[in-house]
Amino acid sequence: MDFKGLFKTGPIKAYFLIRIILGYVFLVAGLQKFIFPDAMGPGRFEEMGYANPEFIAYFVGTFEVLGAVLILIGLFSRFAAVPLIFIMIVAIATTKFPIITEDGFWPFFHAIRLDFSMLLAALFVLVNGSGKKSLDYILFDDKEDRSFEDED
């Protein structure tokens, strides 16, 4: 029996799974800013000390929802990833870094795990695009350049 096949790596065959994870998390987070304004929207941003929390919460929520939808359908995914990356960097800097000084190293790494994962997933989409199972591929694929040919 040949076990080499179990350990070989190859072209990524499931870009859409990364897009589903990223889109789902940002869609839920963005919608909750509108559905639960006290807990997740302006109320939360006011608690964190933001000036004009209502504007900031709905501004961020709008970018989260629009970015999520675009990434889920694979349309302009690279562009949609940019504000999501910025949102994650700001979220980590403002809500997670203070944990290091207050609670220590391990509580910080526990608290940052979702934010860090979403940041890396958004960076993945920025670098790699949407993949074959996307509107970007259907609408903008260069039929002469088949560099994604191995991807499913």
Image (cartoon, rainbow, N blue to C red):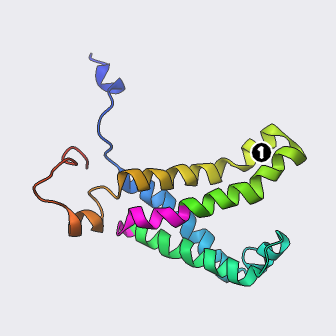
- Residue toward you, 121 or 2: 121
Which residue is labeled 1 in the image? 108
Residue 14, given in percent of the width and then of the height, sits at 35, 49
Q: Residue at x 35, y 69 (%)?
A: 75
Residue with the most extreme right position = 102
Q: In this view, does 71 lie above or below 125?
A: below
Q: Residue at x 45, y 67 (%)?
A: 80
Classify residue 93 by image quadrant.
bottom right
- Which quarter of the rendering shows the N terminus? top left
Q: Which residue is drawn at 85% across and 40% down?
A: 104
Q: What element carries label 1?
A: helix
Q: Which amino acid does label 1 sit on?
A: Phe
- Residue toward you, 29 or 88: 88
Q: Is residue 31 above or below residue 8?
A: below
Direction from residue 117 to residue 76 in the image, left or right? left
Residue with the most extreme left position = 144
Residue 114, given in percent of the width and then of the height, sits at 64, 52
Classified by dominant secondary structure, the portion drawn in magenta counts as helix
- Residue toward you, 20 or 63: 63
- Residue toward you, 8 or 142: 142
Would you say residue 75 sits in the magenta stretch? Answer: yes
Residue 21, given in percent of the width and then of the height, sits at 49, 57
Magenta region, residue range: 73-84
Q: Is residue 86 above or below residue 2?
A: below
Classify residue 125 by image quadrant.
bottom left
Sort mark 1 into few (<14), some (14-19) or many (20+) by Cα contacts within 10 Å: some
Direction from residue 152 to residue 50 in the image, left or right? right
Q: Residue at x 58, y 62 (%)?
A: 86
